[in-house]
Amino acid sequence: MNEQKEIVQGSEQHEASRAEQAASPEVILRPAVDVYETGEGVILKADLPGVDKDGLNVQIDKDTLTIEGSVSLEIPKDLEARYAEVQSNRYRHSFSLSRDLDTAKVQAELHDGILTLQIPKREEVKPRKITVSAA
Amino acid sequence: MFGSPFFSPAGLLEEFDRLQRQMDSLTGASWPGLTNIRAGRTGGFPALNVGTTPEEVELYLFAPGVAPDQFDISIEQNVLTISGERNDPPPEGARQYLQERFNGKFRRVITLPEDVDPERVEASYKNGILHIRLKRQEATRPHRIEVKA
């Protein structure tokens, strides 16, 4: 099993969310993410500007990780929109996780609109150096 | 905050945007300013929303992970420049699979409407959004004219 590739691909989820979007009039943004791997595990960073702790939902269902966020903006009552590059207040992105990752030990941190997830590898799959003992 | 003016049902604002651009190209108007010669391409980092009230012009810049003191905001002759840097590289030795997030120096240039008072500007930063409020000058606000009997 090619475990490294799997977390970044999740293409089925993309298709699913696209279909959902077509069905509902609500636009859902896909946040920009960085994914990298160290010996300890996988680290995922997502840009979720405007999302606070209450508006964030990180969920793992079997092997699917879903990040959802809703933006809270302080907007004056009588504001008229003149120009908008961000046209939705909802973010969503899903990934599929591989079995070598320990989903029970995921750590999440949200700071200044950036979500950082640390997903550790299971102990048994962590890289180990094998020392060759002299004969 | 649902039902806020920026996040109206899909497509509405887009349509408005398109009309606005069409109008701008017809009238040569430069506001909301992304036609400024120094503006660079639209849709860069940080993303920008602009709204107005009778008293203020409100700018929202979606700039997660930038320390408030890293922003450099200046106004010169009705041109507002916001620059800064976001430096958030992956740890050394890490294997990178996806790199979509912006990293490095940024600059956005916005032409403000004529009636903005450059002396009365407030900026705040919360949850990764930089909010700049610019007061408009009294004289240009819409006001009622009483008809005397």
Image (cartoon, coloured by chain):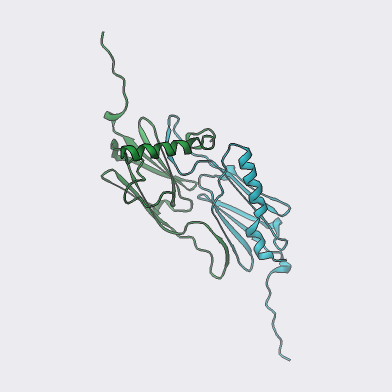
Chain colours: A cyan, B green
For residue A103, above or below residue B120: below
Q: Is B88 placed left or right of B36 in the picture?
A: right
Note whether residue B55 is visible.
yes
Quick one: which residue is furthest to the top in this view? B149
Left or right for A43, reference A87: right
| Res B21 quadrant in image | top left
Q: Residue at x 48, y 51 (%)?
A: B64
In percent of width and height, residue B74 lies at: 31, 48
Q: Nearer the viewer, residue A16 or A3?
A: A16
Q: Position of residue B36 (x, y in %)?
A: 32, 47
Depth check: A108 or B28 in front? B28
Most foreground residue, B72 or A85: A85
Give whichever of B74, B6 is nearer the camera.
B6
Q: Position of residue B114 (x, y in %)?
A: 28, 37
Q: Position of residue B79 (x, y in %)?
A: 30, 45
Residue at the spot 43% in from the left edge and 39% down from the top edge: B18
Question: Quick check: B130 above or below A135?
Answer: above
Point out the image quarter for the C terminus of chain A: bottom right
